[in-house]
Image (cartoon, grey):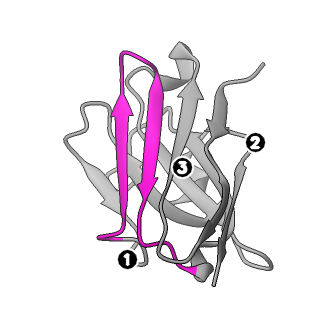
């Protein structure tokens, strides 16, 4: 049973932009915090961004602040990650994830219950 499906990854030159999308089932999406994580080659999975149900709270890793923007469209059960000014170090598989519980700081992968299959983002120098 598929809950989260990412799309929008690809190859882009440094300084370019990409927008990732994550379509979620209603059960996975409704009322939940949604987040983006990434895992680069030879690296641990790391937090990128998260957003709560009402979009009143957003959270970002320091490495992407000012360059990435997370948003969600509750009518479409979709969360987005707009990535601008991309750098080669942003190269990774990007994963969408959903929480069932509520945490004050939703930045840990262990807090998330559902995960997508990931989409590859490659930034060339």
From the top left corner, tell me how far across and down residue 49 is, in percent: 43, 57
| Left/right of residue 6 with respect to residue 77 in the rendered view | right
Q: Is residue 15 above or below residue 115?
A: below
Earlier in the chain: of badge 2 and badge 3, it is: 3
Tell me which corner region of the image, top left, top right, bottom left or bottom right, holds residue 92.
Answer: bottom right
Query: Which residue lies under the disc numbered 1?
Result: 62
Residue 124 is a magenta residue: no
The residue that disc 2 covers is 117
* Residue at screen point 75% across, 42% down: 117
Residue 113 lies, in percent from the top left, at 61, 38
| Distance (Cα) linking label 2 and label 1 | 24 Å
* 2 or 1: tag closer to the N-terminus: 1
Q: CA distance from mark 2 to mark 3?
A: 17 Å
Badge 3 is on which residue? 111
Give how far across and how far down residue 65 sits, in percent. Answer: 33, 71
Query: Is residue 4 positioned above or below 51 on the image?
Result: above
- Callout 1: SS: loop
Looking at the image, tell me whether mark 1 or mark 3 is earlier in sequence order.
1
Name the residue at 36% across, 34% down.
72
Give the Cα separation between the discs numbered 1 and 3.
19 Å
Label pair 2/1, CB-CB below 8 angstroms: no
């Amino acid at each position: 049973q598929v809950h989260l499906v990412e799309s929008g990854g690809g190859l882009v030159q440094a300084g370019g932009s990409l927008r990732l999308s994550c379509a979620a089932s209603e059960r996975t999406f409704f009322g939940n915090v949604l987040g983006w994580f990434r895992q680069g080659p030879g690296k641990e999975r790391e937090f990128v961004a998260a957003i709560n149900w009402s979009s009143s709270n957003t959270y970002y890793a320091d490495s992407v602040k000012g360059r990435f923007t997370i948003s969600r469209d509750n009518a479409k059960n979709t969360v987005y990650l707009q990535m601008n000014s991309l750098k080669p170090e942003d190269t990774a598989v990007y994963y969408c994830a959903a929480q069932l519980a509520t945490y004050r700081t939703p930045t840990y992968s262990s807090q998330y219950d559902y995960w997508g299959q990931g989409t590859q983002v490659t930034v060339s120098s």
